[in-house]
Amino acid sequence: MGNITIKTAEDIEGMRVAGRLAAEVLDYITPFVKPGVTTGEIDRLCHEYMTNVQGSIPAPLNYCPPGYTPYPKAICTSLNDVICHGIPGDKVMKNGDVLNIDVTIIKDGYHGDTSRMFFLGEPSILARRLTEITYECMWLGISKIKPGAHLGDIGHVIQQHAEKAGYSVVREFCGHGIGKVFHEEPQVLHYGRPGTLEKLEAGMIFTVEPMINAGRREIREMGDGWTIKTKDRSLSAQWEHTVLVTETGFEVLTVSPGMPAPPAFIQNQATAAA
């Protein structure tokens, strides 16, 4: 199994709380995401909500993996052709923009990690379709999670759905194990072959967070050392949930009252399972 930690009942309870709090930050910020607002203002509001209302800690702030400079903000705001790790700043958002807000909080030592897409005003048909297909990709990946399944099953179904729509899957970034550590084993690739890579066991917790580009999959890194954009400047979308492998399937941990409903095919699957 390598170094994939199997979480205890106590860990799982802590991760449920952290997951819910991360999702509630996104609920809270939703009404503020509108044209004329800067990404820096979104960051400030989220940071204050985490610290003052939740008593949680923003995990990205000063996060510093080897070879990186410390990340300077509380959340990531990835706008339009930014794939991931966009740093909030003075950029004023305008009508037609599409934004990913990625929130990771720490509560009582446990990490909750989730992201959503937001439309500013009226999005283009392309932006709407890319966002919807990416959302379906995430949920198709999650739907494969159960003991005995393989990580490759998740990547395969995501890649198939994205490429069938004419889109591409970013290869350089992937989902990850999470718990008391922000990023741990396993790596959860969003492409691959069924039946390959690690076998899933009850008690594993990891993120599923496909990054899907409207154009080609190649990336470019900006001079700030964090921001990743599409090389061809095409739009990119991403959604993320933190998921627990249960004895019978999966449990999404990053749930909140304002979260978007899962696609119909997931709801039908859940009804069939019940």
Image (tube, rainbow, N blue to C red):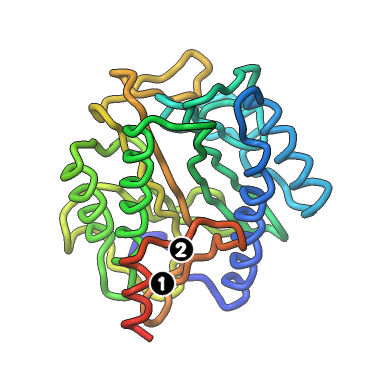
Q: Are marks 1 and 2 in contact (CB under 8 Å)?
A: yes
Q: Quadrant of the C terminus?
A: bottom left
Q: Residue at x 53, y 35 (%)?
A: 65
Q: 10 Å neighbourhood of mark 1: few (<14), some, or many (≥20)?
A: many
Q: Quadrant of the N terminus?
A: bottom left
Which x, y percent locates residue 73? 66, 30
Horizontal relation, residue 122 to residue 157: left or right: right
Q: Residue at x 17, y 60 (%)?
A: 194
On the image, which quarter does residue 249 sit in? bottom left
Horizontal relation, residue 114 to residue 139: left or right: right
Residue labelled with disc 1: 250
Three-letter residue code for mark 1 = Phe
Which x, y percent locates residue 96? 47, 26
On the image, which quarter does residue 232 sit in? top left
What secondary structure is found at the residue carrying circle 1? strand
Residue labelled with disc 2: 243
